[in-house]
Image (cartoon, coloured by chain):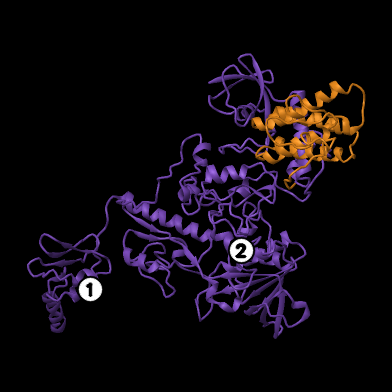
Chain colours: A purple, B orange
Amino acid sequence: MAHVTINGHTVECDDGITILEAARKAGIDIPALCSHPGIKSPASCRLCTVEVTARGRTRLVTACTQRVADGMELHTDTEQLRHYRVLLLELLLSRCPNVPAVRELAQHYGVTETRFESHVPEENCALCGLCVSVCQNLVGAKAIDFVKRNGRLEIGPRSDNGKPSADCIACGACAMLCPTGAITIHGYPPVDHRELTSATPRAIYVPFAQAVPNIPVIDSESCIHAKTGKCGLCDQVCDRDAIQHDQYEETIELDVGAIIVATGFELFDPLEMPQYGYGRLPNVITALEFETMSNAGGPTHGEILLTDGSSPQSVAIIHCVGSRDENHNEYCSSVCCMYSLKCAHLVREKVPAAGIYELYIDMRATGKGYEEFYKRVLSEDVTFIRGKAAEVTDVAEQPDEDGKLIVTCEDTLIGEIRRLPVDMVVLSPALKPRADAPELARTLGLSCTDGGFFLEKHPKLAPVATSNDGVFIAGACQGPKDIPASVAQASAAAMEATALIDAGSVTLEPIVAHIDEETCGGCKTCMNSCPYDAIQFDEEKAVCVVQEVLCKGCGTCVASCPAGAASQEGFEDMQLAAEIEAVLDS
Amino acid sequence: MAPRRYEPTLGDASNEVNSRMPATDTTAVGEKTPSVDLTEYFYEFWHDKCCGECIPCREGTEQILTILERMSQGHGREHDTHELEELGDFMAATSKCGLGKKAGKHLLSALRGSAEHQPTPVKQEDVLSVPAGG
C-alpha cells in the first residue's frame, strides 16, 4: 500500500496503480481524453498533467502514466495547471471545434472560444492516439497507426491504397473508445433488424435477462483474445479473477431418477414464404426482431426504427405466418394473436402518429384478460383487416406507394382486395417443434403428434407424463402455448417427477417380457423393435436381456423374435392355446 | 500545413556568407536579420521534425508558426507576443518529449532576448531576437 497526498488529502492506494486511477478512486477528477482503464495510455492529450513533489523535487507529470509511490505529494488543480489546461483546450478547440466532448470539457474550464486559428474546422479527430494504442497493444491487430499524408499527420491504415486495412478485424474497439467520436465502422447499415436478434451485443454478455446462473459468458467468435491472443481487458477489470479463457462447453453425464423434457419450440422461418419478402425487402421483420427493438435495454434503446434509422409512419402486422396454412403448419400457434396485438399496442405507444394495420384470419384471444386487451387495442385506432396477406412487395402502382412496402390482402369483411402502403411489416411466425425433436424423441422413447410436438400419455388424465415412465414433458415442446400455460405445465411436471423420485420405489407392470437365455441367438432384433428401450445386450453371454423395470409388457419383442426366445409372462403360446381351448369348450 | 523549404531574406543580400542558413549547429546571421524571420525559420524546422504524438507540441508548433508567419508578413496582432510567450512556456512544461520541450524553450529564449535588447515597445517585426547559440 502506498500513501500519497492529493490536494492536501492523504489517500491510501494500491502499489503500482497510476496517479489517475488513485485520484479517481479517491473521488478526485482529473480531466483526460486519451486514457481508458486497462489500455496503455498514449499520454498524448497531456490534459491529466499534475504537479508531483517527491524526494524534495517538484515536477509536472501525466497522471495516466506516472505510477504512485509512497510519500508522493500531488496537486491536480493548481493555478498553473488550470492555465495549461485552458491553453490545451484552446488548442484542441482550434483543431476540432465541432466535437461536443471537447466543447463540453472546454466549457468546464470556462473556455468557449479559442484565440487560435482553426485550419480544418470540420476535423473531428484530436489525434490523441487512443485508437492506435488499443489497436496495437490491446487488440493486437495493428491495423491503424499515425501516418503522414500530404504533410498532414492523420490516423489510418499504414498503406495508402484507398482500401480498408487488411489487418482490421472489425472489432470496433477504436470506434467505441474514440473520445471525440471521429471513427465510424463502415459496411453496416444504421439498423440491421436481422442482426439485432442474431448477433451478440458484445463478446462477453449475460445470455439473457434473469438467466440462472446469472453469470456472463464469452462468445469465442467475437472475443478479441480468442482471435489475436491479446486484449484480456476483462481479466484486468475483474477484481475477483473470475475470467477463465480456457473454459469451454463440456458434456456431463448424470444419473437421474426422472427427466423433464422442456426443450421448447423453434420459430417458423419466414424465408419459407418468399411472398412476404422477408430477407429480401428491408423493413420486413419478424415479431421477435420487433420485440428486441422495443426492449428498452435492447440495441435501439426501445426505439422502433427502420433500416435507415428513422421512425416508421405506418406498420402492418401479419398474423399466421406459417400457421393455419396447409402448405406449412396446419395447427394454430396459439400465441401469435396476442403478441401481434402487443406489437400494435407498442407501436401506438412509441410512435403515436403511426398508422397500424392488423391482418388476421380469426382473432383468438382465449385467456384470462386477453379479450379485454383485444378490446383495448381495438380502441387504440388500430385498423383490423380480416384476411390473410397475399404478398408484400415494393413495386409501386400508385404515386403514394413510392418507396413504401405494399401489403396486398383481401378484406373479407368488406369483400375487397386492398393494397396497404406501409413503412414496416411485422410477421408473426408460427411456433414449430425444434428441428432436433425427432432425435430427442428417439433417445427418450417419446412419441410425437402429427405436427412433431411430443405426445403426452393422456391429454386429460396424464397431460405431463409420457408413454415412457419417468420422462415428463412441459411447455411448448408438447404443443404451442404461452408462458402462463408453460409455467403451469412445468410445475405439474416437476411435481410428478418429485413424487416419482420421493416414493423411492416404482410400481412395475404385472405383465413383462422374458427372454430365454438358452434359445436366444443374440440377433438383437428385439432390441431394435422395443419402443421403451427395455432390452439390453449382455456382451458376456451374448444374449438379449429384458430390463423388467422398463418393460411395459407390450409384446412387440415376443412377436419379433425369430428364435421364439421371447415370451410374455402369463401369455406364453401354450397358455394362450389352453385359454382358447377352455373358451371353446365352455 | 505542407512542409516547405524556406529561403529567408537575411538583411544584406550582398553578404554571401550570411545569406545561407544550413540547419547545422552553427548558424551565421547578419545583424539586420529580422528576428521574426529567423525564429520562423527555426520553427519550420521544429514543425517538420515534430512527431505529432502529443497535442502541446503538435498543435503548439503549428499555432506558433501561424503567428510567426503572420508577423513576418507584417500582419501581427496586438496579443501575438503574449500568445507566443504563453505557448512557449506551455510547450516547455507539458510536451511529451525533449524535442517539444526544447521547442518551447527556444521560443521563450527568443522572446527573452527580444525583451533584453528592446526595452521599449517596438514594431512587431522587430520584437524577436536571435537566441544565443541558435
Residue displayed at 90% across by 36% down: B77
Q: Is residue A226 above or below residue B13?
A: below
State which chain disc 2 sits on: A
Q: Secondary structure at mark 2?
A: helix
Q: Nearer the viewer, residue A92 or A37?
A: A92
Image quadrant containing the C terminus of chain A? bottom left
Q: On the picture, is A137 further left or further right than A282?
A: left
Q: Is residue A306 above or below residue A72?
A: below
Label 1: which residue? A556
Label 2: which residue? A193
Q: Indicate the quadrant where residue B52 lies.
A: top right
Residue displayed at 40% across by 67% down: A437
Q: Indicate the quadrant where residue A372 lies.
A: bottom right
Tell me, yes or no, whether dots 2 and 1 are on the same chain: yes
Q: Amino acid at mark 1?
A: Thr
Q: Position of residue A28 (x, y in %)?
A: 67, 27
Q: Position of residue B18 (x, y in %)?
A: 78, 34
Can the viewer see residue A144? yes
Q: Position of residue A525 (x, y in %)?
A: 19, 72
Q: Amino acid at mark 2?
A: His
Q: On the picture, is A458 further left or further right than B97?
A: left
